[in-house]
Image (spheres, grey):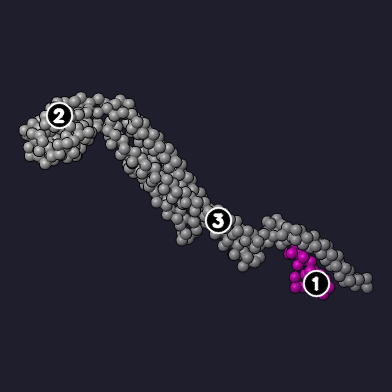
Amino acid sequence: MSEITLSSAVRNNLLSLQSTANSLASTQERLATGLKVNSALDDPTSFFTAASLNSRAGDLNRLLDSVGLAVQTLQAADDGISAITKLVENAQATARQAQQSTASTAVVNSTVDHSSTGDLGANTTITDGDTFTVKVGSASAVTITIADTETINDVATSLSAVANVKATVVSGKLRIEATNGEDLTLAEGTNSPLAALGLTAATTTGTVNTSRSTLATQFDSLRTQINQLAADAGFNGNNLLNGDSLSVIFNEDGSSTLSITGVTFNAAGLGVSASTDSFQDDASITAALGELDTAISTLRQQASTFGSNLSVVEVRQDFTKNLINTLETGAANLTIADTNEEGANLLALQTRQQLSSVALSLASQADQNVLRLF
C-alpha cells in the first residue's frame, strides 16, 4: 500500500523474505512432483524438448505392439512349416512302404524267343501293317501296329507307350504287364500276329494289392492333414502359409518397413498330388516320392526365409525397446529433479526464511525506538 512508508532496512528484509518464500514454494513443488521443469514457464527449451522426446517414445511404443504381433505371426508360420514337414516325411515313409510291397499285376509272357530273329518280318509270319489290340481294365483298347522291319524291342516300346502298360524283353521273350493291377486283354487285329509273337488272345486277370491300397488311403489322409494344418497356421487373422502377406512398420513415419510375402503351403501348393491307381503301379509311387522330395526342399527353403525375416523383426524389436528407453531417459534428464539437491535447498531456504524473519524483526525494532521519545 503506497500510503504506508517502510524504512529501507524493513523493505529490504521484506523483499528478501518474499524471495525466499517464492524459492521455498518452487522447491517444495519440485519435491512433490519429482520434476524440476513442471511447465513451459520453468524452462521452455527443456520442457518442449522433453515433450517431443516423450511423444516419439510413445509413438514407438505403440508400434512395438504391432512388431510383437508380427513376431508371433512369423513364429506361427514357422511352427506350421515344421509340422507340415513332419507330415510330408510321414507321407514319404508311407509311399516307401507301399513301394516295398510287391505289386500285383496281370502279366503275359510270350513263348517265342526272338533274340536271334532280328526283323520280325524276316523270320516269322509277321507282315507289314499287322495289328493287335491291348486293353487294361475298362479303358479303351489300343491298337498296336507292327512293321515287318521291326524287332521285338520295337514292339515292346510301342506297348509301353500305352497307359498302365509296361513291356520288356527278357531273353528275347516279350513280357507285358498291367501296372495298375487291373485285367490285361490281348486281342487279334489284322492278320492275327499274336501267335507269331508267342502270345495268346485272352484276358489275364489282375489282382489288387490290398496292402498298397491301404497305404494309398493313408497317404491321401496325410495329404488332407497337410491342407488342414496349413489353414490353421495363422495368427491374429494373418496366415503366411495360406497366401497372406505381412508388412511390418518399424518407425513412426513409416519410412522403415519389412514386407514379408506369404506362401500357399497346402498339398496343391507344395505340388503333392493324391495317390493314383491306389499305388498299384510302381511308377505312381515313384512319382509321388519325387513330389514329396521337392515339397521337403521347398519347405526347408521357406523355413530359412521366414527364419531370416523373424531374425530381422526381433532385432528391430530389441532396437526399438532400447531406443524408447534412450528417449525417455533423455526426457527425464531434462525435467526430473535431483531430490537430494532439492532437499538440501529446502533446508537452506527454511533456514534463510527463519533468518530473514529475525532480520525483519530487528529492522522493525529500530523504528520502534522512535516511540521511546514520546
Q: Identify the secondary structure beneath mark 2.
A: loop
Q: Residue 141 in the image: state x and y as whole percent.
A: 14, 33
Q: Residue 111 in the image: state x and y as whole percent.
A: 17, 28
Q: Is residue 101 magenta?
A: no
Viewer-nearest residue: 102 or 137: 102
In the current view of this chain or complex, which residue is farthest to the front? 116
Q: Residue 46 in the image: state x and y as whole percent.
A: 63, 65
Tell me which amino acid carries mark 3: Phe
Q: Identify the secondary structure beneath mark 1.
A: helix
Relative to 136, is 273 on the left or the right?
Answer: right
Query: How much space separates mark 2 and mark 1, taking CA atoms?
Result: 138 Å
Query: How much space separates mark 2 and mark 3, taking CA atoms?
Result: 79 Å
Q: Residue 347 in the image: state x and y as whole percent.
A: 80, 60
Label number found at residue 11: 1
Report the residue marked by disc 2: 199
In the current view of this chain or complex, which residue is farthest to the right? 373
Q: Quadrant of residue 179?
A: top left
CA neighbours of label 3 inside 10 A, class few (<14), some (14 to 19), many (20+):
few
Tell me which amino acid carries mark 2: Leu
Tell me which amino acid carries mark 1: Arg
Report the residue marked by disc 3: 319
Relative to 353, is 104 on the left or the right?
Answer: left
Q: Nearer the viewer, mark 2 or mark 1?
A: 2
Q: Which residues are magenta?
A: 1-24
Relative to 300, is 367 on the left or the right?
Answer: right
Q: Which numbered disc, 1 or 3, marks the residue that appears first in the sequence?
A: 1
